[in-house]
Structure formats: structure tokens, C-alpha cells
Amino acid sequence: MKLSWAQAFTSLKYPNYRLWFWSQMFSMFGTWMESTALGFLVFDLTRSPAYLGLVGFAAGAPTWLFMLYAGVIADRVSRRTLLVITQTAMMLLAFAIAALTFLHWIQTWHILVIAVLLGTANAFEAPARQSFVLEMVGREDMTNAIALNSAMFNTAMAVGPAAGGLIYGFFGPAWCFAINGVTFIAVIVALRKMRLPPFTPPAVRTSALADLKEGLRYVAAHPLIRTIIGLIGVISLFGISFVTLFPAWAVNVLHGDAKTNGFLQSARGLGALVAALLIASLGRFHFRGKLLTFGTFALPAAIAAFALARWTPLSLLLVFATGLSLILVFNLANTLVQTHSPDSMRGRIMSVYALVFFGLLPLGSLGVGVTAEKLGQTAAILIGAGVTLGAATALAVFMPHLRRQT
């Protein structure tokens, strides 16, 4: 295994990807500020872990309704145009919640409605964003670009939540939402400035339903893609849901406040950033399956240890480890699915991937919130870690072909 710092940033040689990378970095900074502030605002208003889960559920529910159809659209229209539309919608929603909060009109039902609308925009944005990577870089650098996307996302996650917690503590949540709205402008401008080949609509036109069924049949018939998407489903439902409890955990377990919540989110982002840079620096390596398998075991171990820790510095270190493990799994799973997807169906296949990932997150959020309310927060997190460990073991025993993927 050879690490190369120069190889880590190979995709930045593409001008279109440079525009995407830096504008998204700026925008994601605002997104994580808003996400952190919103979670703590909900807990501030309700003092209920279950309500934290309900908001996560509301944000993810539109995924089930729209994600697969969005994948068909992503294969039929300009992905850049679709991204401009969805980014504009998210910007307007950020300004709306900022205005409600500045005016002291904000109520929990407002947050639920905005969460549903934001989830709808995300449902149409995700397949286009996932499949847009190959329009910006060469196929041989796709793994690197996906790793850099993770690095960009998690750099923002490492800094944004901590900044959001501090701004929330000193100035209030409205400023977090307003700053997020401004950051979307950078992405919209960058997308408009990209020099891309003219979009050519598909030559053969069938119904949207027929296209959707074709994508689903391909996923169901492809053993590797089917297995990886199943793994992502388990982790989305049980492995990552513990982060929903961070606002309550910061107050009830670590005896902290909004700043503690922000530091927990940032520690996860920092771990994810390290993992993303590690993958990017490996270049065009050929042991993706083994590294993915390692991540599936490291993740539940780190989550279980976090559930038992009560010292804030140790908790931050363990959250760092969960962030690192999650990116090993998500980044390499994404790469393997896209590598085995034909160009003509990439949008639809990635919509299935995104549906499982984003669609099960709200169920995981709702489940961990209700379980924490009934059995306690520690028990809720340990249950999720146990199920995730069981899935990793089953995968290692019954799906050994995954470890052989290059």
C-alpha cells in the first residue's frame, strides 16, 4: 500500500471539478452549520429525543416518494440544470427558516414542514449529484473524485458544526440558517460557469415507468450491486442513526450544551475527512473490497464504545473513529456500485442506492429516538451497534466475493 499526497488531489486537474469542489466545500460548511443548529433548536423547543427522530423522519420521508423517479429524470435531462434547480430550492428554504427564527415566529411544526420540503429537494438532487461526477472527471479518476467529494463534505462537517454550535451559543440559530442560505449562491454560480459538452437526450424514449423498472431489474440481477446496496441499507437504518441523539447526548450524558453538540458533529466530520484523504491518497489501488470489509467491522466497534463512554474527550475520539469507519464503507461502496453501472443507467442505479441510503435514514432516526425514549439512550445506541456487527459478520461469511473486489 503506497500513499501519495500528490495522488490525493488528482481530480482537481479538471477545471469543472475544481469549480464543483470549492463551491461545494463552501456550501457544505453552511449546510452543517444549519443542520447542527436545527437539531439543537428542536431539542431546545421540545426537550424530547423522540422529536429529534421525528424531524429526521420528516426530512427523509420524501425520499421514498420521489427518489426513484428522480433517477429516471437524471438520465433524461441535463444533470447540471437539475442541480441548479434543487440548489436554488434549498437556498430559499434556508432563508425561510432564518426569517422565521429572526422574527421569533419559529415553531416545531414550521421545522417539520421545512424538513419535508428540504427532503423533497434532496430526493431530486441526490441521483443527479451522484451521477454528475463522471461528467466532470475521467472514468479512471472516478474513485479519486468520489474520495475528494467525501473529503470536501467532511472538511465542512469537521468545521461547520463547531462553528454552528459557537454561533448558536453567542448569536442564536437564525444566523446559522441565514449563512447557509448565502453559501448556496456559490454552487449555483459554479454550475453555471462549467464548460460541459451539450446535453444529448436519450435517443430511445420509453415511459418513465419502463425506465424505472429497467433500472430496478438491473440492480436485482447484479449480485455485487445488490449486496452493496443491502449493506448500505443496514448501516443507514442501524449504524448511523445514533448521530440523531447527539443534541440529547451532549446535554443528558456529557452534561454539555450547544457547543458540545457541535464538537461531537465536528469530531465525526474530522474522522470522515481523514478516511476520505486516505482513500484519495491511495490513487488507483486494487483492494477496495478488503478495505470496505474492514470498515464494516470497525464501525460497530466504535459505536458500541461510544455508547459506554462518559468522558467528553474520549467520546470525541470515538466519534472520530465512527466517522472514519463510515467513510471507508460509504465511499468504497459508492465507487464499486458506479464502477459496475453502465453509463446509460447510472442515474437510475444511483437513485436506488440513494433511496436505500437516504430513505432508511429517517426510519433509523425515528427508531433510535423512540428506543432512546423507552429504553434509554445508551441501550438504543448499543442495539444499533449490535445489528450492524451482525450484518458485517454475515457479509464476511456468506459474501466472500466482496473482499476480492479491486
Image: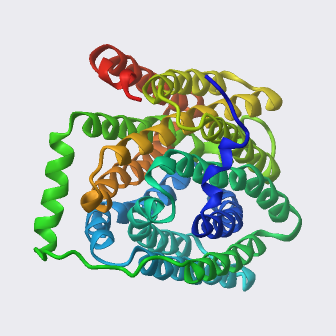
Horizontal and vertical percent position of residue 104: 72, 81
Q: Position of residue 75 (x, y in %)?
A: 29, 69
Indicate the position of residue 180 as horizontal and vertical percent values: 69, 73
Left or right of residue 256: residue 150: left
Left or right: 274 as drawn, with respect to 198: right
Q: Is residue 287 visible?
A: yes
| Residue 94 seen | no
**Is residue 101 depicted above or below 116 in this figure?**
below
Location of residue 128 (image quadrant): bottom left
Q: Residue furthest right?
A: 170
Looking at the rendering, which quadrant does residue 28 occupy? Answer: bottom right
Q: Residue at x 64, y 63 (%)?
A: 21
Query: How many numbered discs, if any?
Result: 0
Using residue 326 as the reference point, say whether residue 186 is left or right of it. Answer: right
Q: Position of residue 170 (x, y in %)?
A: 89, 65
Q: Is residue 106 left or right of residue 297?
A: right
The quadrant of the image that shows the N terminus is top right
Which quarter of the rendered picture does the C terminus lie within? top left
